[in-house]
Image (spheres, coloured by chain):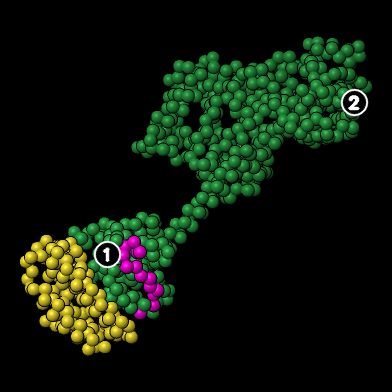
Amino acid sequence: MVDVPLNILIADDNKSDRLILAAIVKKMGHKVCVAEDGVQAVAQYHSEKPDIILLDVMMPNMNGQEAAVEIKSSAGEDMVPIIFLTSLQDATDLAKCLDSGGDDFLTKPYNKIILQAKINAFSRMSKMHYILQQQRNLISDHNEHMVHEQEVAKAVYDNVTHAGCLNLPNIKHMLSPFSVFNGDVLLAARKPSGSMHILLGDFTGHGLPAAIGAMPLAEIFYGMTAKGFLMDDILREINSKLKKILPIGYFCCVCMVNLSFRKQQIEVWMGGLPDFYLLRHDTGQVEKLASTHLPLGVLSSQGFDSKTQRYSLRRNDRLFMWSDGIIESRNDQGDLFGETRLMDIFNGNQDQEQLFDNIVNTVNEFTGESGKDDDTTLLEVKMVPEAEVGEVDIDMSRGMITGPTDWNMRYTLRGDTLKTFNPLPVMLGILSDVPALHGLSGQLYTLMAELFSNAFEHGVLGLSSDLKKDAKGFAEYYAQRELAMKSMDDGQVMFEFDHSPTQAGGLLTLTVTDSGGGFDYVGKQANQFSDAGYSGRGIPLIVSICDSLEYLGRGNIVKVTLSWNAKGLEE
Amino acid sequence: MARLNMSQIDELKDLMEEAFADLVETYISDCEEKITRLRAAIEASDAPLSAEISHSLKGSSANICAEDLSDLFKAIEDQARLDNLSQMPQPFSDVQDEYQRVKGALQNLL
């Protein structure tokens, strides 16, 4: 007797033959259903779902071969073994049985032992086929589930690591991920001051494990940039975050650039990336920028060095940045693209405007059909006048009306904190809680930055703004600044913010008091501060932002007001 | 030639147990009906029908261990397939006689 009884269909038009077969099958412990011709056999197949079919070849109405064709086509990918019952000897007839879907033969007179062996063999085969099908369906379900998960994860990933302001006209970029998820990350955002932060990152490996670290990286980059944090703070934060979350041996090669349109300058921090090229528009000369740091996520916060390199850029000077996927791409012979080929593109180039496309095309032609084995990223950023990239676009989605409107706050910085700490993001964060001021955060940042540097450098440190008239003076100014910082031990700058609601909107009054000696302001009206002697203090800029500006006390107190109109802002 | 293969028929009896009688009766009534039809088909010179019926009789006779009878039906089937019904190696009465002997032998076993 068998463990699991099978259901076996016997289709034979001869009653005495059916009786013998049925007796053999029942003796084995299986269930039997019978059919007297091919039509009945097909009908029984559908109603009884037999595991194995014993099918006579010569039957009235529909012969065994025709029945086999019908049954096999309905069975689809389910395995239904068909054993033909035949005394046919002719090879052509036997071949016809196989062609119609038969799996085996049993000749008359029926032999009990042989039939038992065949039923057992097909039973094992069916079981195996069933398990195989189950496993395959399981794998396919798992795969479908995984693809769905990846799609959702990808949507979240894309939202977090969005391209920021990469669409600005001074930027060209290409991101070519090796798989669904990109282990390279390219981010760009405008700062409240109007400058731009750009970050190119290349995580260890590729695919999801590499991309996952890009999420906190992008969150920090966009969040802190919008709040007015400087590169130094942002890099430190990213480094310590990555150090904390990435497994040992995983890190992110990064280049971060602070591009100032007003100062016509870039400030660069590079760790672990290949040399970048700075193409001078006038001369066509290429300057190489080399990585001077370890990648992010390697060093502890104590060991981390945020020192940057500064480069003056003139209009249309271009910085080319890339991940190592470009230089390390291979052709079908396995040769690396290499830095020489990259440099050749620059040397042979006639039209700087076409250079970016040249690089992309040359690399694509080189790799050809061989496919790639890493993420490749390429970026070109060009120095242009700020007007070409437009105003900073601040998210106003929170609305205008709600938020704190009637409040006062003082914030005083003293001693070492005054020398080293940048208070602007904190203050901007508080001001940004007033929704209307959030929309003005670019101007407010500039305003506070100017007032703070006046109060600290000209007030507390007592440096003269006259020095900043020419390049030589600038150098002297910074030298004096270093000295004054060292010798300063007390000194403070106090910010007082006062915000009150008005009929039309609100009024912000900002008073900055420093502990310095002040200056002779008597007799000067706000509009007269634009004289050459005061330009070093950024007064014209402040005046252009504020409604009013006045100096008080001995010249160590400056008070500015800025009013906003709800109607005007909502338009 | 053996009328019934005796060692095989013992196995068959073991297999069928009490249904053996039913099997014998089923075989006999099936044979009588088919032999009548086969004779008519041969007389009508219907070769395909003769081949079909003799094929069925050949199979069931083999299964009931009547080897000689099965061979006789096989000879008819072969001739029918060659469309040569007029050239039978043996007269049809030989088939009928052998059938009667098999029938008697089977009934003796009951």
Residue at 69%, 22% in the rendered image: A391
Quadrant where the N terminus of chain A sits is bottom left
Task: Indicate the chain coloured green by its letter.
Answer: A
Residue in front for this viewpoint, A225 or B90: B90
User: Which kind of residue does numbered mark 1 sit on?
Assistant: Met
- Percent position of residue B78, x then y: 13, 66
Residue at 26%, 88% in the rendered image: B110
| Label of residue A502 in the image | 2
**Chain identity of mark 2:** A
Query: How many neighbours does mark 2 have within 10 angstroms: few (below 14), some (14-19), or many (20 or more)?
Result: some
Task: Indicate the chain coloured yellow by its letter.
Answer: B
**Span colored in magenta:** A27-41
Residue A454 seen by the camera: no
The picture quadrant where one finds residue A361 is: top left
Is label 2 on the same chain as label 1? yes
Q: Determine the secondary structure under disc 1.
A: loop
Answer above or below: position of A522 versus A51: above
Answer above or below: position of A240 versus B67: above
